[in-house]
Structure formats: C-alpha cells, structure tokens
Image: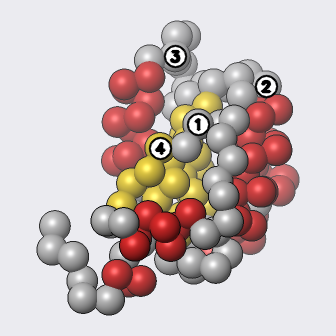
Amino acid sequence: MEVPANNTNLKISFCTTCKGRLEHLKQTLPANIEACKGYPNTEFVILDYDSRDGLEQWIKDNFQEEIKSGLVRYAKLDGATDFKMAHAKNMVHRLATGDVLCNVDADNFLASGTPEYLIENL
C-alpha cells in the first residue's frame, strides 16, 4: 500500500469480534467511539460471532445513526458453535474498509488520541 502524503487521509478500522461479550462491549464501544472523535476517518467493525446474549439487538437499538453514517459496521455470523479466533479475525478484517486495521478486543478501551498516535507512528 502506498501511504498518502497527508496521513490524516488514512482510514483506521478498529475491528472487534464478539461471542458472549455484550457486557464488555456495552462499556467499551461507546467509550472508544468517544475517544476517537478527534480523528473522523475511523470506523468500528463489530463481528457478532453468533452471540446469544442480545448483542445484535443492543447494536440495533443503540447505534442506528452510527451505522447509517458508516462509523459502525455490524455483521453477524450465524451457526458458529465454537469461537474460532483466527476465523473471526479474518472475517472482521475482510469487512473492514480502512487502510489501517487494528484489533480491539471487546474489553479493551482506547485512549483518547489513539488514531492520531497510530497514524503518527506508522
């Protein structure tokens, strides 16, 4: 990939895979979105790996505007009996549209300025 002269044009995809992690995501996703507001060229890609804890409904109830704007991308894999980390991460990365892909576990908080730090240090 050729890096643009102005790195602020790089889009960062924060990729999260979830299976049974709704309680964590309820805390981290809103906080992470807030922490990245200073860098508008971000997206949060959530792969629901057949969660049975209400993740799909929670996303639909709370992030409609973010989904419409492209800030949040949500996808669900049905029928996954076991969580396969490599498979899940490969899937979520394929869904991402960013130039930079960053794994963020469901229980990870991003510090304010994380996107700028990543871009500066690429």
Q: Are marks 4 and 3 in contact (CB under 8 Å)?
A: no
Is there any visible trace of residue 48 in the rendered image? no
Dots 2 and 1: beta carbons under 8 Å? no
Above/below status of 90 relative to 97: above
Name the residue that disc number 1 marks.
105
- Near mark 2 (Cα within 10 A), the count class, few <14, some 14-19 or many ≥20, is few
Amino acid beneath label 2: Asp
The image quadrant that residue 84 belongs to is top left
Name the image colouring: secondary structure
Q: Residue at x 77, y 34 (%)?
A: 24
Element at badge 2? Answer: loop
Q: Earlier in the sequence, mark 3 or mark 1?
A: 3
Of callouts 2 and 4, the N-terminal one: 2
Residue placed under numbered mark 2 in the picture = 53
Question: For this view, does 96 lie left or right of residue 50?
Answer: left
Nearer to me, 72 or 11:
11
Disc assigned to residue 83 = 3
Q: CA distance from mark 4 to mark 3?
A: 16 Å
